[in-house]
Image: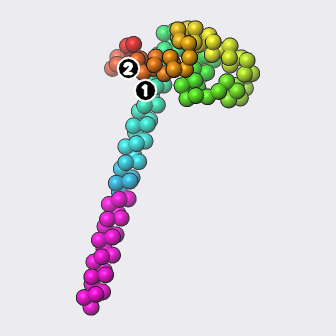
């Protein structure tokens, strides 16, 4: 009888520990999702603000959104149903307007652009 009770107690401990890990995993997942969404939202706000400040066209804004994620001209062209050469042309104009030379400069510009409570500051 004591062996059965000990086995039941061990099973109960395993169930409680497993449930704890499950709850902890769910909480971590929710927190990670909120953090990721916040970063994506903040980047989008920065992209919109820079586009407005620098006078990017609607199409340039669409393409600008794709650049930080490392999308290639061919992929961007397929997404917007335009040629790769058209994407290259828009990308050159975007770089010129943002006064950057490459994607590294874009990442730096996005990092340096700070979102404040009532607007943006670079």
Q: Are marks 1 and 2 in contact (CB under 8 Å)?
A: yes
Question: Residue 87 shows which numbered tag?
Answer: none
The front one of 101 and 7 is 101
Answer above or below: position of 64 versus 79. above
Residue stretch in magenta:
1-22
* Residue marked by disc 1: 42
Q: Is residue 93 left or right of residue 74?
A: left
Quarter the C terminus occupies? top left
Q: Is residue 78 left or right of residue 100?
A: right
Image coordinates of residue 26 in percent, x first then y, are 39, 52
Q: Main secondary structure of the magenta part?
A: helix
Q: Is residue 48 visible?
A: no
Q: Is residue 21 left or right of residue 105?
A: left
- Farthest residue, direction left: 2
At x 42%, y 21%, the residue is 111
Tell me which corner region of the image, top left, top right, bottom left or bottom right, holds residue 41.
Answer: top left
Q: Give the number of callouts.
A: 2
Image coordinates of residue 73 in percent, x first then y, are 67, 24
At x 48%, y 25%, the residue is 44
Secondary structure under tag 2 reads: strand
Quarter the N terminus occupies? bottom left
The front one of 52 and 5 is 5
Tell me which corner region of the image, top left, top right, bottom left or bottom right, holds residue 24.
Answer: bottom left
The crowd level at tag 1 (other Cα within 10 Å; few <14, some 14-19, many 20+) is some
Secondary structure under tag 1 reads: helix
**Separation of disc 1 and disc 2 at Cα?**
7 Å
Q: Is residue 8 magenta?
A: yes
Image coordinates of residue 70 in percent, x first then y, are 58, 28
Question: Residue 115 shows which numbered tag?
Answer: 2
């Amino acid at each position: 009888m004591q062996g059965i009770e000990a086995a039941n107690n061990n099973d109960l401990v395993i169930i409680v520990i497993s449930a704890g890990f499950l709850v902890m995993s769910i909480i971590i997942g929710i927190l990670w999702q909120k953090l990721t969404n916040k970063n994506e939202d903040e980047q989008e706000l920065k992209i919109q603000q820079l586009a407005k400040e620098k006078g990017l066209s609607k199409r340039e804004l669409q393409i600008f959104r794709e650049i930080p994620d490392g999308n290639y001209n061919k992929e961007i062209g397929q997404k917007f149903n335009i040629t790769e050469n058209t994407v290259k042309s828009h990308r050159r104009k975007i770089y010129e307007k943002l006064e950057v030379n490459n994607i590294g400069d874009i990442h730096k510009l996005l990092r340096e652009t700070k979102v404040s409570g009532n607007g943006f500051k670079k």
